[in-house]
Image (cartoon, coloured by chain):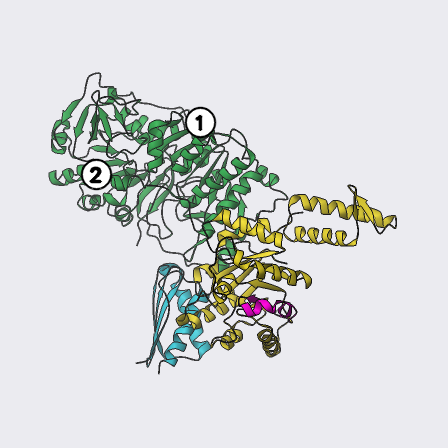
Chain colours: A green, B cyan, C yellow
Amino acid sequence: MKNVLQRTVPEGFKAFAGSNAYKNFKRRTIAEKHTGKGFISLKSVSDMFDKLGIKDGMTLSFHHHLRNGDFVLNMVAEEIKRRGLKNMKLAPSSIFPNNKILVELIENGNVTDIYTDYANGPVAEAISKGKLKGLCVMHTHGGRPLAIESGDLHIDVAILAVPAVDKEGNGTGTAGNSACGSLGYAVSDLKYADKVVLVTDTIIDKAENPQLEGKYVDYVLKVDAIGDPSGIVSGTTKITKDPVGLKIARDAAKLLDELGMIKDGLSMQTGAGGTSLAVAYYVREFMLEKGIKGSFASGGITGYFTDMLEEGLFDELYDVQCFDLKAVQSIGKNKAHHAMSGSRYANPYDDNVVDKLDFVILGATEIDLDFNVNVTTDSHGTIMGGSGGHSDTAHGAKITVITTNLVKSRLPIIKEKVTTITTPGEDVDVLVTERGIAVNPRRKDLLEKLQGSKLPIVPIEQLLETAHKITGVPEKPEFSDKPVGVVVYRDGTVIDTIYKVR
Amino acid sequence: MKRGIAGSLESNDALITVKESDKLEITIKSVVYDFFHKQIEKTIRDTLSELGIDKISVVCEDKGALDFTVRARLITAVKRMEASK
Amino acid sequence: MRRSLLFIPGNNPAMLRNSDVFESDAVIYDLEDAVSVTEKDAARELVSGFLNCAGALPMEVIVRINGLDTEYFSADLEAVVSDKIDSVMLPKASAAYLAELDFLLTEQEKKKGLKKRINVVPIVELASSVLQIDEIVKCPRVNGVLLGAEDLSGDIEVMRTKKGNEILYPRMKLAYACAAYKIDAIDTPFTDVNDGAGLEEDCRFVANLGFNAKAAIHPNQVPVINSIFVPAQKSIEWALRVQEAARQASLKGLGVFSLDGKMVDKPVILRAENIIKKARKYNLI
């Protein structure tokens, strides 16, 4: 079956029918699972498997806020391996290079299905090589809470790494050795999994304003360490020093200004990549120069945004995950810096934040002549990322700006057709590169506003031609027709299929 | 045996090593091999024929160099080889 | 007429391929100080190869070749002179070297059948050149002079400082000589690439001395330089009003008239025209 973008949809999945199609359906939710009584303390990971009766074929979920410093997913993987469990389904909200132990479990059939929003490193490569028995289902950050609350993604046990847990079983990300700030992506798992285990290394008396409420918690397991702080948050996130990236960022900010987006009450989000972040830097300069005060910034939050909050350039920050130490410190002390759940952030049926965004600045691994964006696979088709919040924010924000180099290494970033569609072109408005800016022809309103602009605005076809003049026309790689995964749009439909790489 | 080396393994550059040989041998390693190895080989062949060389060993370790870089590094490597008497 | 001239190291393919995107009025492809002695041959080949095949080139292409007193000079000149370049930058310039370069360029242009005449931008970076500035600006093909403060302060054995008192004399002398011959006075690069505020201050200072351009050693310096060596919005508005008033006056047959209570005569009108020309060129009107 083909979806509306003419991409193949494997049997058993619904086909993507447009980014607004979710409006034709009603929200479905299963009941939240309160425990009604206190939690039980566990002695060890093995004790957890025994007490919870974790067995073949179960679905275990995890969140990724400890990122590349996470120990918890790996501890559970070790135990699955030790016990020789089979056909396990894992649902970590993201997979990082340090989760490489999963490769072995995938190869041996201990793990046969994976649900995740983002995957990078050896596990992603193993999936791309076709080692996973089932399909890797790749959600968006807003689609995952929807899948969980609707029961489409049923979780037997949520095993949640929590930097500090209090005596009532409330969990917080703002204390402990592995403090990581917001725990936004763990909230749906907490509320809707059959059983919930918090894994922590720090017990405190009382958590202030805890993001994870104790009433949902069945078990608490205390271990020596849940993560390696050096892998969790970087000390500081810096804007790019690359002059090409900075030029792109400057032009993007100028463009937003010409479009009248830099105005009082503005709301914005950027990715944490160096170029996206640099756009925030130049937007800040415009705001300071014109004396503008924004309403909020959201998303993964970095020190740049906490600085802007402190300078009074925003009223509030809505934070689903903290990207650096400054953000972690800020969320613990600044009352205007709010933690939010993944659902509140981007679930299409929730009163979500992305729909209130004026503009979002995002990256792209590939973008095509229809403005479809790929951030899921590289040009060989190997998984190296995933939507995360890409397609959620692109849909919600009034203006979606993609900033990217036109050519990376020798590869043009613009293709006739992207290898994998992550975000549909109908939600992508502007592409800013170092050699020109292309506006999606669907946005006649923007093109009109930009008439007479001195910015180098050209048709996207011309940018493709420019790129080919520089690099030559790349040969088309061959793909197999064996699916290894699906890219699930935020409404639960399949927007594209990921194929085995040769 | 005479040989010449030019270029580097920095990104967007290529390291080209040429050696005297009794036949034409071209070896290409590239970070964009699947997309551009034919184009790189064509550039190498065209440059060699411009230089009037039909027997030589060329090893190109490419880090995403554009054609002008491959060509310039090859010419420099050949000139260095010829000067290495 | 230039504001910014960006140096790009000649042996760096990554920098070369993006050299046209940084919005500098000229790019200087450097075969001299940015290239180590073991890579002179490679850089020469790379720069000439790049210029011959690049799809998009900067507004003005300048190549800094090695000096006349070096073993690389002849090969550099032979390799780079083509229709693709606009100007040659000559280090350690003197009036005598410039005369010789003019002769050699004429020879090259004839030999290669060039359709254009190559300009020359000499670098004044020796004490002896400073004393010769009025000769240098008169040399054929010279349409701008770059002050090279690093070598110059070495030559007169003083410490180079951010404030630049040690180069005040050559700066003033160069500004006057260039103004007299209506060519670009190009200031020495500001070497601390991480000090944006310092760069801005330095630009303002030399703009007030009469410089109309500055060299950059990092692309990130270009926007600051461009923003300062450009007529300010206020002076553009003034110039447009002068032009309009002059048009009205000439309709009435008046040579001299007054605007805002100030007398406007030919030199003022010329200055206004220059500002407008520059503003048009840089897309400000």
Residue A139 visible to the viewer? no
Amino acid type at mark 1 = Asn
Q: Nearer the viewer, residue A56 or A17?
A: A56
Residue B31, picture quadrant: bottom left
Q: Which residues are magenta?
A: C116-139
Residue A165, picture quadrant: top left
Chain bearing mark 2: A
Residue A275 visible to the viewer? yes
Q: Which residue is mark 1?
A: A24
For the residues tagged 2 and 1, is the chain the same?
yes
Against C246, is B6 above or below? below
Look at the image and tell me in which quarter the C terminus of chain A lies.
bottom left
N-terminal label among 2 and 1: 1
Q: Which residue is mark 2?
A: A71
Chain bearing mark 1: A
Q: How many marks?
A: 2
Amino acid type at mark 2 = Phe
